[in-house]
């Protein structure tokens, strides 16, 4: 990694690192950061491949991204931090909290990805059929020198994110196929889950599953909110729940240190 773009706001209080979603940037979290900075030192990061940060040198999984954030913490002499992850950023936060619990003081997941939910029978059958077709098309291209995969299969069956991913397609495939159920059971940090009832990208069932897997996790259901509940004035709603949670986690830290 040559360049990791970041912005640090504030100079006192516990460290909070905000990690944005796929194909987004740190700008998403700026309104929320402005509300947290009064009590915390807030770090906004453009994840590698997004915003003003350089792309990963190869196809990364969440372990690679978590290692990148860990290096950022080491570079800035952050021993422990609160992590706030949205969607794709939640995947990374989960990985870091599970593998390096000593570095995470609190975990907030907002509409996070990271689990594989059971699909309805018809949708499951279609997914398996498309996966089989994908393998057949790629085999045909390799055997006959054709380009059916890029010319026909991807435009017809590729998701919106996949079509827009460009050089990050390998990273997208590598990360979306991960299931972090086992990692959830390893998380020791206090955990807050914030989920919108109108979230179509990460349905509420995911939040409920995270609550069941992460010991002591608290799920707040945000009525009428979609996948981006922190946008615009929504940042005040999220701060309303996040600020007391961070204070509670900080108090637990002080009690353990006493």
Image (cartoon, rainbow, N blue to C red):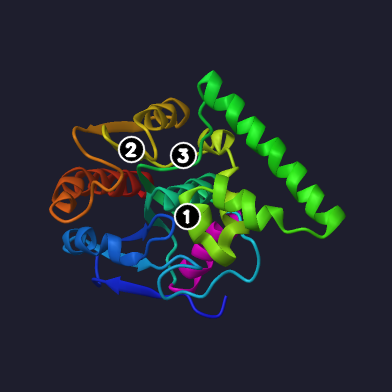
Q: Nearer the viewer, mark 3 or mark 2?
A: 2
Q: Residue at x 77, y 42 (%)?
A: 136
Stretch in magenta: 63-76
Q: Is residue 73 magenta?
A: yes
x, y (%) of residue 128? 65, 31
Magenta stretch: includes residue 48: no
Which residue is at the far bottom?
A: 2
What residue sits right under mark 3 in the picture?
A: 188
Query: What secondary structure characterizes most of the magenta part?
Result: helix
Residue 149, can we see it? yes
Q: Earlier in the sequence, mark 3 or mark 2?
A: 3
Q: CA distance from mark 3 to mark 2?
A: 15 Å
* Above or below, comparing residue 194 to residue 69 in the picture: above
Q: Residue at x 38, y 61 (%)?
A: 24
Sort mark 3 into few (<14), some (14-19) or many (20+) by Cα contacts within 10 Å.
Answer: many
Residue at mark 1 to residue at mark 3: CA–CA distance: 11 Å
Looking at the image, is mark 1 or mark 2 earlier in the sequence? 1
Upstream in sequence: badge 1 or badge 3: 1
Give the percent coordinates (x, y) of residue 155: 56, 52
x and y percent of residue 101 in the render?
A: 50, 47
| Residue pictured at 45% horizontal, 42% vertical | 113
> Tag 3's secondary structure?
loop
| Mark seen at residue 103 | 1
At 50% from the left and 41% from the top, the residue drawn is: 114
Q: Residue furthest top?
A: 121
Instruction: Give the side of residue 181 with respect to residue 191, left or right.
Output: right
Residue 14 visible? The answer is no
Q: Secondary structure at mark 1?
A: helix
Mark identifier at residue 193: 2
Q: Nearer the viewer, residue 40 or 220?
A: 220
């Amino acid at each position: 990694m040559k360049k990791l773009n970041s912005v640090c706001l504030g100079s006192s209080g516990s460290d909070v690192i905000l990690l944005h979603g796929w194909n987004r940037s740190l700008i998403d979290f700026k309104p929320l950061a402005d509300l947290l900075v009064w009590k915390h030192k807030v770090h906004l990061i453009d994840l590698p491949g997004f915003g003003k940060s350089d792309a990963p040198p190869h196809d990364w999984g969440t372990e690679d991204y978590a290692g990148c954030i860990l290096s950022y913490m080491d570079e800035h002499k952050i021993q422990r931090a609160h992590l706030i992850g949205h969607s794709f950023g939640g995947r990374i936060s989960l990985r870091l909290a599970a593998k390096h619990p000593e570095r995470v003081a609190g975990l907030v997941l907002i509409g996070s990805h990271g689990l594989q939910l059971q699909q309805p029978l018809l949708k499951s059958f279609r997914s398996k059929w498309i996966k089989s077709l994908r393998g057949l098309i790629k085999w045909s291209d390799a055997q006959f020198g054709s380009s059916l995969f890029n010319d026909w299969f991807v435009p017809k069956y590729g998701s919106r994110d996949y079509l827009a991913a460009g050089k990050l397609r390998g990273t997208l495939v590598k990360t979306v196929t991960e299931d972090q159920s086992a990692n959830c059971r390893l998380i020791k940090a206090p955990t807050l889950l914030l989920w919108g009832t109108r979230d179509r990208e990460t349905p509420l069932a995911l939040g409920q599953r995270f609550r069941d897997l992460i010991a002591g996790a608290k799920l707040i259901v945000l009525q009428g909110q979609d996948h981006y509940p922190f946008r615009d004035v929504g940042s005040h709603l999220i701060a309303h729940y996040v600020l007391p949670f961070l204070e509670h986690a900080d108090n637990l830290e002080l009690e353990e240190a006493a």
